[in-house]
Image (cartoon, rainbow, N blue to C red):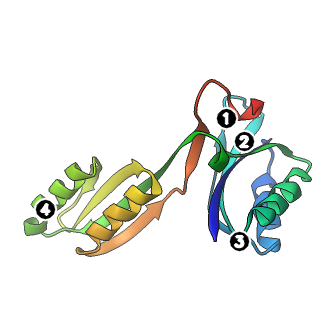
């Protein structure tokens, strides 16, 4: 399976995200991550979808089916063009007093941030590519990870041309 990151511009209306995700799942394609948010235009929502497919042909099927939805304005495969992708993760780790110094060192090495601390836990925030997020999760697995929340990938095209003009 290969993963592709699609930027889908849609009309900012209720139910559009449900239609998009439903269409992909009904076709038995796996959505690895999906995130949606406002754009520079209030009437447009941007949906970032990481989809796993077996072949380029299956990817074309996903794109063709999505483009048939009335509320879809534009679909761009950012995996095929120069782009910058990032993901955000927050990780709650059980932290005894003796573990805290080690956790601070790990946070520094990964250029992450400690955003909350209690007598029992530390919450770490990190933004980066999926491989960096996976790496800190692996290192922190030596401690007791209480909870993880990941956003999934978001991306922007590199250079002066925005997705809406690609």
Secondary structure beneath label 3: loop
Q: Earlier in the sequence, mark 4 or mark 2?
A: 2
Q: Are marks 3 and 4 in contact (CB under 8 Å)?
A: no
Q: Earlier in the sequence, mark 1 or mark 2?
A: 1
Q: Marks 3 and 4, how far apart in space?
A: 41 Å
- Left or right of 106 in this view: 77: right
Q: Residues within 10 Å of mark 2 (few under 14, many from 20)?
A: many
Identify the residue at horizontal 87%, vertical 59% (top origin). Answer: 65
Figure quadrant of the C terminus? top right
Which one is closest to the eye, mark 3 or mark 4? 3
Position in image of residue 124 (x %, y %): 30, 56
Which one is closest to the eye, mark 4 or mark 2? 4
Q: Which residue is mark 2?
A: 45
Q: Residues within 10 Å of mark 4 (few under 14, many from 20)?
A: few
Q: Quadrant of residue 33?
A: bottom right
Q: Are marks 4 and 2 in contact (CB under 8 Å)?
A: no
User: Which of the numbered marks, if any, corresponds to residue 73?
Assistant: none
Position in image of residue 8 (x %, y %): 74, 47
Relative to 139, is 128 above or below?
above
User: Which of the numbered marks, if any, corresponds to residue 39?
Assistant: 1
Q: Nearer the viewer, residue 53 or 155?
A: 53
Q: Residues within 10 Å of mark 1 (few under 14, many from 20)?
A: few
Q: Which residue is mark 4?
A: 102
Residue at the left extreme of this rendering: 98
Q: Earlier in the sequence, mark 2 or mark 3?
A: 2
Q: Marks 2 and 3, how far apart in space?
A: 28 Å
Q: Marks 1 and 4, how far apart in space?
A: 40 Å
Residue at the top extreme of this rendering: 160
Q: Residues within 10 Å of mark 3 (few under 14, many from 20)?
A: few
Q: Quadrant of residue 73?
A: top right
- Left or right of 26 in this view: 116: left
């Amino acid at each position: 399976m290969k993963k592709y990151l699609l930027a889908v511009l849609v009309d900012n209306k209720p139910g559009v995200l449900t239609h998009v995700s439903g269409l992909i799942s009904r076709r038995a394609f796996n959505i690895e991550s999906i995130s949606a948010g406002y754009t520079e235009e209030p009437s447009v929502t941007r949906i970032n979808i990481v989809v796993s497919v077996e072949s380029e042909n299956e990817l074309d099927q996903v794109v063709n089916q999505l483009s048939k939805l009335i509320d879809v304005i534009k679909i761009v495969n950012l995996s095929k063009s120069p782009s910058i992708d990032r993901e955000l993760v927050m990780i709650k780790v059980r932290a005894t007093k003796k573990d805290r110094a080690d956790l601070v060192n790990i946070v520094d090495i990964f250029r992450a941030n400690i955003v909350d601390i209690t007598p029992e836990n530390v919450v770490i925030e990190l933004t980066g590519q999926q491989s960096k997020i996976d790496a800190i999760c692996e290192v922190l697995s030596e401690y007791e990870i209480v909870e993880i929340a990941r956003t999934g990938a978001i991306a922007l095209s590199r250079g002066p041309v925005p997705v809406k003009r690609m």
